[in-house]
C-alpha cells in the first residue's frame, strides 16, 4: 500500500513538472461512476450469466497536451475509483465494495466551437489495480453480517484489469472547467485462471468535472 502511495505521488509530481515544461495543462477533479460487471459460468454443460450493477465515485489528476497536429493531443490521467456492486436477487443482500488505482492514456482531438467553448472527443486504453474488494452479506442462518475479502490468498479474482475508454470533454475556457462523459469497456477476464468462470468489468459510465490549471 505504501509503495502504491509513493508511486502515485511520483506520477502526479512528474505529470505536473512535464506540463510546466511542455506548456500543457493539468486537471484535477472527480465525478460519479455507474459500474457494471458481467459474469458467465459453465459447469457440467450448464451455462448461467449475471450482471451486477452499482455506482460510486472517482477522483483524478491528469495532463493534457497538444501535439500541434490540427488539434490532435493526448491526455494522461491517474484515477482513484470507489464503487459498490449489487449482485443478482438470488444472492440476497450481498454488496461488493471495491477501490482501484488506475492510469489511462487517451488520444484526443479538440474542436473549438467558440472562443469560450471547445469539444474534445477521446479514446484510449487504461489499466487499474485493485486496492481492496470486499463482499458483505447477511448470513440467513445466523442472521449476522459477514465479510469476505475477494483478494485473499485462495481467491482467483485478479486485482489487475484493463479497459478501453471512449468519451468526450467540453472545455469551458473562461471558467477553466472541463465537463466529461466517458464509457469504460473491460478487456480482461478477472478470472482468467478459472476456465469455468468469465467475468469482465463494464461498461462503466463516468460523468465528472475538473478544474484546469
Image (tube, helix red, strand yellow):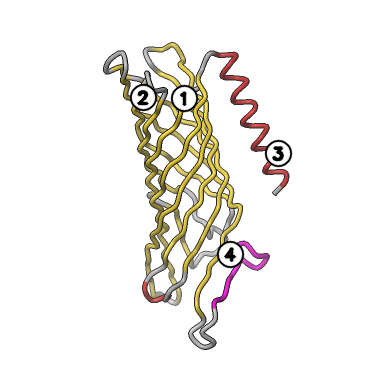
Circle 1 residue: 212
Nearest the camera: 155 or 138? Answer: 138
Q: Residue shown at 35%/32% (left/top)? A: 168
Magenta part of the chain:
145-155
Q: Based on the picture, tell me whether residue 61 belongs to the magenta stretch.
A: no
State the image coordinates of residue 123 (x, y, percent, origin top left): 40, 33
- Most extreme residue toward the front is 175
Residue at mark 2 to residue at mark 1: CA–CA distance:
9 Å
- Residue identified by numbered label 2: 171
Please report the residue visible at 40 percent of the width from the left and 48 percent of the height from the top.
204
Magenta segment: does it hold 148? yes
> Dot 2, crowdedness within 10 Å: few (<14), some or many (≥20)?
many
The local secondary structure at tag 3 comes to helix
Mark in front: 4 vs 1? 1
Q: Residue 150 bears which disc, if any?
A: 4
Q: Mark 3 — residue?
A: 6
Q: Label 4: state its secondary structure.
A: loop
The one of 18 and 177 positioned closer to us in this rendering? 177
Q: Residue at x 46, y 48 (%)?
A: 57
Residue 143 % position (x, y): 51, 84
Amino acid at each position: 500500500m505504501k509503495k502504491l502511495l509513493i508511486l502515485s505521488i511520483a506520477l502526479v509530481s512528474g505529470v505536473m513538472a512535464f506540463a510546466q515544461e511542455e506548456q500543457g495543462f493539468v486537471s484535477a477533479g472527480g465525478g460519479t461512476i455507474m459500474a457494471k460487471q458481467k459474469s458467465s459460468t459453465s459447469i457440467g454443460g450448464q451455462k448461467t450469466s449475471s450482471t451486477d450493477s452499482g455506482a460510486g465515485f472517482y477522483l483524478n489528476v491528469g495532463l493534457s497536451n497538444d501535439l500541434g497536429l490540427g488539434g490532435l493531443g493526448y491526455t494522461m490521467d491517474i484515477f482513484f475509483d470507489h464503487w459498490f456492486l449489487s449482485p443478482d436477487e438470488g444472492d440476497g443482500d450481498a454488496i461488493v465494495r471495491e477501490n482501484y488505482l488506475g492510469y489511462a492514456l487517451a488520444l484526443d482531438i479538440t474542436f473549438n466551437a467558440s472562443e469560450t467553448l471547445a469539444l474534445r472527443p477521446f479514446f484510449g486504453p487504461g489499466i487499474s489495480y485493485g486496492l481492496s474488494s470486499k463482499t458483505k452479506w447477511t448470513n440467513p442462518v445466523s442472521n449476522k453480517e459477514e465479510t469476505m475479502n475477494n483478494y485473499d490468498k485462495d481467491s482467483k479474482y485478479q486485482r489487475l484489469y484493463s479497459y478501453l475508454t471512449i468519451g468526450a470533454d467540453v472545455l469551458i475556457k473562461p471558467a477553466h472547467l472541463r465537463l466529461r462523459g466517458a464509457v469504460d469497456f473491460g478487456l480482461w477476464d478477472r478470472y482468467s485462471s478459472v476456465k469455468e468462470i468469465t467475468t469482465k468489468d463494464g461498461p462503466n459510465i463516468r460523468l465528472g468535472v475538473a478544474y484546469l490549471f
